[in-house]
Structures are given as C-alpha cells and as structure tokens.
Amino acid sequence: MTGKNWDRVPIDAQSIDAPLSRAAVFLVVTVPSEPSVLAKVCLTLDALDDLIKNVGFRDLSARLSCIVGIGSELWDRFGSDKRPVELKPFARIDGAAHAAPSTSGDLLFHIRSERADLCFEFERILLDSLGDGVTVVDEVSGFRYFDARDLLGFVDGTANPTGADLPVAAMVGDEDADFAGGSYVVVQKYLHDLGSWAQTPASLQEAIIGRTKIDNIEINDDDAPRKSHKSLATIVDADGNEHDILRDNMPFGRPGQREFGTYFIGYSRHLWVIEKMLQRMYIGDPPGAYDRLLDFSTPHTGTTFFAPSRPTLQALVSAAQEKLKVA
C-alpha cells in the first residue's frame, strides 16, 4: 500500500493489497461461448475501475475495492497467446474421510468495503453491466464477526503476511514476468455443523484448530500424535522455507435456514502452495491423519482463478476485443 492514499481516491481494481474489510461479496459467474456475451463481459471488465470510482466516491472512507479473477477455461477463450504458468482448474481432492469438490466458475469478483450497502450497490450495477448472458453460480455476502473471528469462535487470518512480506507471499514475481503483480486465487465455501461443534469440549476444539480460543495463542503441537489445522496449513518446502498465503476469509450465514459458514479465499504467489495445503488437510500428514476441522466443516465449492495486475487485465481484455472484432 506504499504510496497510495485511500482518503483521496478509491482503490484501483486488482489491488491485492487493499485493506481487509468489514463486509464483502464473493460473486462467481460462468460465461458462455457466445461472442456477444463475451464482448459484453470484456466491456464490463474494461470499465471496472470506473465502476469502482463511481460507487466508491459516495464514501471514500468505506474503501470500496474489487478484484476480478479469471478461470482457466475463460482465459483460453479470451484468446491470449500467454497464460500464467500455474493456472489450471481446481482439482478435486478425495481423502479417506472427506472430499474437496471442484465446481464451475469463469469469473470471480471479490468485492470489499467497510459498508455492506456499497458492496451491494457495486454488485447490482456490475451484474447489470454483465447482462443476462452470464450465470451466477455462487453469491455469498460475508461480514466481520466480532474481533475477526469465524463462526466457530476462533480468530481467523492471524498468519496473514504483512508489510513487505505480503507481496512476496501473494503476488507473482520475476519467475513469471509476464504476469508479475498478479495472484492465484482459490475459493471454497464451507458450511459448519455448529451443533456438533458446540458439543465438542473447548480443549479439543483448541487441539483441532491449533490455537487457544479466548486469547488466540498458538499451540505447539510438533510432538502431538495428530497435527492441528494450523500445522497442516503451514507449508514448508524442501529447503526449510515457509510459504505464506494471503487469506481474506469471511463468515456468512442465514440463521433462519440453519446455514452457517466460512468463505475461504486465498491469494498466493504460487498455486502449488494452496494445493499442497489442501492436500495436507484432506489426505493428511501422515496419510489418513486428515484435518479434524473437516469433521465439522464441509466444502460445497472449489474453484481456481488468476487475478492479473490491472495493466495485464487491461491488455488481456483489449486483445480479446480485437479478436472478437475480427471474428
């Protein structure tokens, strides 16, 4: 965020390092292959920054932002001759006890603000701009819960990188220079069995999560017979280097429908980091010793995207529009 003044202008589109917010909308749509629909999508993406400004200027302190992620199949349909080196569809994971499904999605819009009404207004105008040709396959409105806790009662996002560590963990660098500044994004919508969780003793809950519930102190479980969620989600390479991701998870729910969940969204410089994290959770380390949190939290979606930098997104859309004119 160095050199940016949030109090004077809205946040640019594709600002991975935009501040975490009190409210968010996670919108996933699919885009059919019809040229007319694709052309309208391109027009909308081309105007995304203006849309942020038009809505965000109503209350600059609310820090409205939006990041768009593009799925592997839609990237190919844009006709670009280059693509992020690791971009591919989300691969289903089948563990001994639990599975992570792979679900459809061509575009992800991660809308954030301090005000839920600005998220709503932005999404409303965005969908009007995209038109009836696209199909909404997932739409979740998230909120901050007390002191950044999830609905299970634990603080979420403690291990997020900050300062100079954030771009190192979340943004592609020179290893894929054409897409430097972008980020791989994985989303999963989890629903919780709060009834069963409430019947679980707090000491066992803490052992499952790997942190104390009240004061959020990390529990050392190196010698424990089974690793916690915290430990399974910690990725260390063969050289002993730890690889972080940027999480902006949000609680969501509809008490009247007995729906309580967490929307997981992870930004990473390397897609393999999130993939390894999920493999460890579902397969276990060692195999069979899966993340016990999955006994209470069930994933209903799983999709991978790439969020390009703003200049790369503009170049991608411009090239697609030229190809559509020729066609």
Image (cartoon, rainbow, N blue to C red):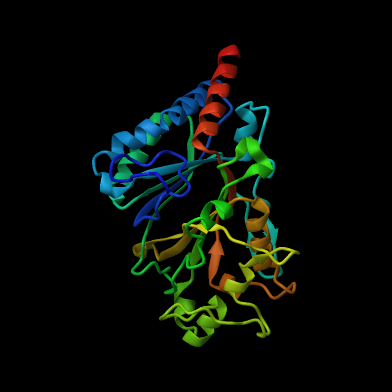
Give x and y (percent) for residue 46. Answer: 45, 28
Q: Quadrant of residue 178?
A: top right
Residue at 48% x, 59% y is: 162
Q: Residue furthest left?
A: 58
Task: State the residue lying farthest toward the top.
Answer: 326
16 relative to 218, above or below:
above
- Where in the figure is residue 312, as x and y percent of width and height? 55, 33
Q: Quadrant of the C terminus?
A: top right
Question: Residue at the location (50% across, 25% down)?
Answer: 37
Left or right: residue 184 versus residue 2 is right
Query: How many numbered marks have been drawn onto this rendered protein structure?
Result: 0
Q: Would residue 228 be visible to someone looking at this image?
A: yes
The image quadrant that residue 31 belongs to is: top right
- Please tell me which residue is depicted at 27% across the width and 48% down the height of the picture: 61
Task: From the top left corner, tell me how far across and down residue 6 is, in percent.
Answer: 33, 46
Residue 126 pos. (x, y %)? 38, 35
Left or right of residue 147, residue 286 in this image: right
Q: Visible in this render: residue 201? A: no
Q: Nearer the viewer, residue 85 or 35?
A: 85
Q: Could you say which is closer to the camera, residue 298 or residue 217? A: 217
284 w.r.t. 277: above or below: below
Depicted 279 relative to depicted 45: above or below: below
